Image: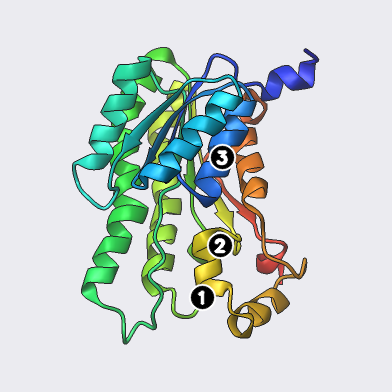
Amino acid sequence: MSNWEKRFSLAGRVALVTGATKGIGLETCKVLADAGADIAAVGRDAAGLKEVEAAVAAAGRKCLTISADMASTSDPVMAAERALKEFGTIDILVNNAGVALIDMLVDATVDDWDKTMAVNLRAPFLVARTVVPAMIRQKRGKIINISSQAGVVGLEAHGAYAASKGGLNMLTKVMTVEWAKHNIQINSVCPTVILTPMGEQVWGDPAKGDPMKAKIPAARFGKPVEVADMVLFLASSASDLVNGQDILIDGGYTAV
């Protein structure tokens, strides 16, 4: 194995991925397993969990599947504890589970607001604080929070979503302030529209999607693997000096 391959290798590592059954989460499980990591995959969709398990097994890695609802106060902790019990530690945490309940602020419901905050912001906090003591003990860890460009710039009809992702970016920074001294790197990945099932649902109509593409200098939306590859970099030793950052994968959207 060449030196660059060693820097990006995850051999001997364990990754916990939430929202693992589709889109960015599924692709992240595949990419991290391909790099050598065993996977604890968390999601609600039974068929999707079987797909993740098969994909990780095809890469020759172990996969633990955990059914959990990130909107609850107990399931995020339960999922993290199950993964810790199975593997003994978690080297890499990818907080990917998310919801986008889109509505103008004057029409948004309290229930949608609360669910968005529970899944997009509270769950990452609960999972991270459950797994971080093991990272502290081993003096090593990676936490990657999947945020959004909507956590950096305002976007119409995304009030609750943007607020949750902006909060996640700040949570990332506080995690860094508290945990970086233990050789734990925590970063946010902030993609533009990614053509996941959720992305298709919100932006698939050309009447809505085409004007958004026109604001992106690259003139296209992203693919899940493009986010998963950034996660691989942040999960590997190649990124050991990168900490507390909001890393935009936006085709240049925020450059203009």
Mark 1 or mark 2, earlier in chain: 2
The one of 253 and 256 positioned closer to us in this rendering: 253
Circle 2 sits on which residue? 149
Q: Say what secondary structure mark 1 lies in.
A: loop
Mark 1 or mark 3, earlier in chain: 3
Q: Of tags 2 and 3, which is closer to the observer?
A: 3
In the image, what residue occupies the spot 80% across and 15% down?
2
Q: Decide: marks 2, 3 in contact (CB < 8 A)?
A: no
Q: How is the image coloured?
A: rainbow
Q: Is residue 152 visible?
A: no
Q: Say what secondary structure mark 3 lies in.
A: helix
Quarter of the image for the C terminus: give it: bottom right
Residue count near mark 2 (Cα–Cα under 10 Å), binned few <14, some 14–19, many ≥20? many
Residue count near mark 1 (Cα–Cα under 10 Å), binned few <14, some 14–19, many ≥20? few
Q: Amino acid at mark 1?
A: Leu
Circle 1 sits on which residue? 155
Q: Is residue 146 visible?
A: yes
Q: Decide: marks 1, 3 in contact (CB < 8 A)?
A: no
Residue 243 appears left or right of 119 = right
